[in-house]
Amino acid sequence: MHRRCAMQRLIALAPLTVLVAFASPTAPQVTRATNRAARAHRQVAPARSRPSTSTSSTRDSIVLSRVALSAHGPGARHRLVSWWRGNGNARDSVGSNNGVLQGAVTFGPGVSGRAFHFMKAGAFVRVPRTPALAPTTGVSIDFWVKGDPANAMTTCCQGLVTTDFYGVELSGGFSTRVGINFYVSTDNGASFHHTLDVVRGSFSIAPGRWVHVLGTYNGVVLKLYVNGRLYAQTPWRGLISPMRPTSFLSIGAEDGRTYNQALVGVRYFSGSIDEVKLYNYAIR
């Protein structure tokens, strides 16, 4: 009798054991595993076993929480770090990384509400360096951009959203074709890896119209999406190097890349940038 009860308890706990051992780090798969475990529990539970109680539900929740923490790190590590909407100011809508307007930055019509508008050299948004702006294992930069009619968008180089060792700019790299280029460095600027490295050319865009840009890096590959479509990807492994103590994030320039003073004071963008989002992981 005691042996049969012990076996029943082992069978009842089996689905949870399987869940912990084999659950995938992605939320949808964890959910499917939970459903399968629940069905299996109902099928193998003996007819005389005690009905399901809140204690069982609590135990399931604890197991799922542990799986989620193991997959994504403590404290919801993967997150939207900052969102600069450009609606008449440079405040961070989701965090505390507020920007400071530099030079002749104005605001004009954007994709949603208002947008940053940069007209002259020296105009950009400066976001002071903080630990949150220095992701290492991955990053995503998501924004809209529109060049002024007088900016042919074919002149290298112009900073869009940049830091020392990750960012998006207008550049040519190995090609004479200038366009959108996403970059990272994993060795403190000794070398850089770009989305244009494989395709040998950036994504050229025409001025006067809004274009959506997304650059992602997950520690394994860099990807550049333009208007929702994957344009280029470059394999590379390593941790993103941290910003220098004197550096900062720039919107509309590359003045914050103080690791190389040759980039400061010359790489300004002429046009509008809207809805800038920074994530500390690759969202795609």
Image (spheres, rainbow, N blue to C red):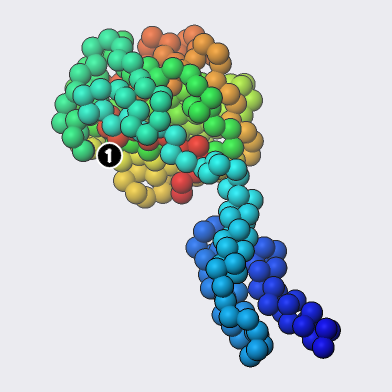
Residue shown at 40% from the left, 30% from the top? 95
Where is residue 148? Give x, y as percent.
Answer: 20, 25
Horizontally, residue 267 falls left or right of residue 208, namely right
Residue shown at 70% from the left, 74% from the top? 14
Where is residue 103? Give x, y as percent.
Answer: 27, 10
- Assess disc 1: are there few (<14), some (14-19) or many (≥20) residues with their C-alpha within 10 Å of its C-alpha: some
Horizontally, residue 184 falls left or right of residue 100, namely right
| Residue lying farthest to the left in this orientation | 109
The answer to whether residue 198 is seen in the rendering is: no
Horizontally, residue 54 falls left or right of residue 121, namely right
| Residue lying farthest to the bottom in this orientation | 47
Residue shown at 46% from the left, 49% from the top? 284
Q: Name the residue under label 1.
A: 211
Q: From the viewer's perspective, is residue 170 above or below residue 234?
A: above
Where is residue 11? Give x, y as percent.
Answer: 72, 79
The answer to whether residue 277 is seen in the rendering is: yes
Q: From the viewer's perspective, is residue 199 above or below residue 105?
A: below
> Splitting the image into 4 quarters, where does residue 101 fall?
top left
Q: 152 or 121: which is nearer to us?
A: 121
Residue shown at 63% from the left, 54% from the top? 66
Where is residue 223? Give x, y as percent.
Answer: 48, 43
Q: 73 or 141: which is nearer to us?
A: 73
Report the label total. Answer: 1
- Identify which amino acid the numbered label 1 is placed on: Val
Dividing the image into 4 quarters, which one contains the N terminus? bottom right
